[in-house]
């Protein structure tokens, strides 16, 4: 398997986009990665926008960037909830600083802005948060996937195949 011996965090909070959570979850498992669902600690079980729930394996204050190869941040309204929890923001910043893959889709650009990692980067996101990411120092482009070093971004669920191809390539790096 292409990601055997690799480990990935998928962040979760209330109101996550179910496609942007479950597609990476199963695709990364299929590739052989060890997937750990990490929540903020605000709940034991988190509800997606369409009512699907997921239980976190760990809380953000219980994991360290050094133990993982990548972090995936789904969109929906969850990133706005995630960035209210310092351990989640710190985890994303630490992963980025360590050169690990940081992958964000849709509204997850909010977490990148809160983590302070957008200055000088080229990214994409759902168009509604374009101003947020540009005000945080990024150059925004309208593409299905953008890879800028260890930062991988996509716009919406339709971009998930390209997003996951880029994540897997980045982890194999």
Image: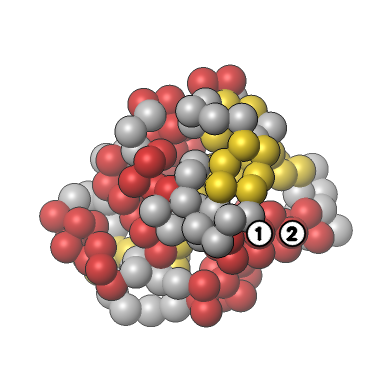
**Is the C terminus in the top left, top right, bottom left or bottom right quadrant?**
bottom right
How many marks the image carries: the answer is: 2
Q: Position of residue 83 (x, y in %)?
A: 34, 38
Q: Which numbered circle lies on residue 164?
A: none
Tell me if 149 is positioned left or right of 134 in this view: right
In percent of width and height, residue 62 lies at 58, 20
Which quadrant of the view contains residue 37? Answer: top right
Q: Does 126 sit above or below residue 117? A: below
Residue bearing the label numbered 2: 26
- Between circles 2 and 1, the one closer to the viewer is 1
- Label 2 crowd bin: few (<14), some (14–19), many (20+), radius 10 Å: few
Name the residue nearer the viewer: 47 or 35: 47
Q: Secondary structure at mark 1?
A: helix
Q: Looking at the image, which is closer to me, 57 or 90?
A: 57
Residue occupying image coordinates x 32% and y 78%: 142
Residue at the farthest right position: 1
Cβ atoms at labels 2 and 1 below 8 Å apart: yes
Point out the image quarter for the N terminus: bottom right
Q: Nearer the viewer, residue 144 or 60?
A: 60
Q: CA distance from mark 2 to mark 1?
A: 6 Å
Residue 87, visible in the rendered structure:
yes
Residue 8 at least partly seen:
no
Can you say whether 121 is above or below 145 in the image? above
Q: Position of residue 104 (x, y in %)?
A: 45, 56
Point 50% across, 58% down: residue: 49
On the image, the x and y values in percent for residue 12 come to 54, 43
- The structure residue drawn at horizontal position 43% and vertical position 58%, both measured from the top left corner, is 76
- The image quadrant of residue 46 is top right
Q: Secondary structure at mark 2?
A: helix
Q: Which residue is mark 1?
A: 22
88 and 45: which one is in front? 45
Left or right, residue 86 beside residue 45: left
């Amino acid at each position: 398997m292409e990601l055997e011996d690799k480990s990935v965090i998928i962040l979760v909070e209330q109101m996550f986009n179910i496609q942007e959570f479950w597609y990476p979850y199963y695709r990364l498992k299929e590739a052989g990665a060890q997937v750990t669902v990490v929540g903020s600690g605000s709940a034991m079980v988190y509800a997606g926008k369409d009512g699907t729930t997921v239980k976190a394996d760990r809380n953000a204050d219980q994991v360290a960037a050094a133990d993982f190869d990548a972090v995936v941040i789904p969109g929906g309204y969850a990133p706005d909830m995630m960035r209210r929890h310092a351990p989640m923001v710190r985890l994303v910043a630490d992963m980025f600083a360590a050169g690990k893959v940081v992958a964000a889709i849709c509204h997850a650009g909010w977490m990148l802005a809160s983590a302070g990692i957008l200055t000088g980067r080229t990214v994409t996101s759902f168009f509604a948060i374009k101003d947020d990411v540009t005000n945080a120092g990024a150059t925004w482009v309208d593409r299905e996937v953008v890879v800028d070093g260890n930062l991988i971004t996509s716009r919406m669920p339709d971009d998930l195949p390209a997003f996951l191809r880029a994540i897997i390539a980045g982890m194999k790096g």
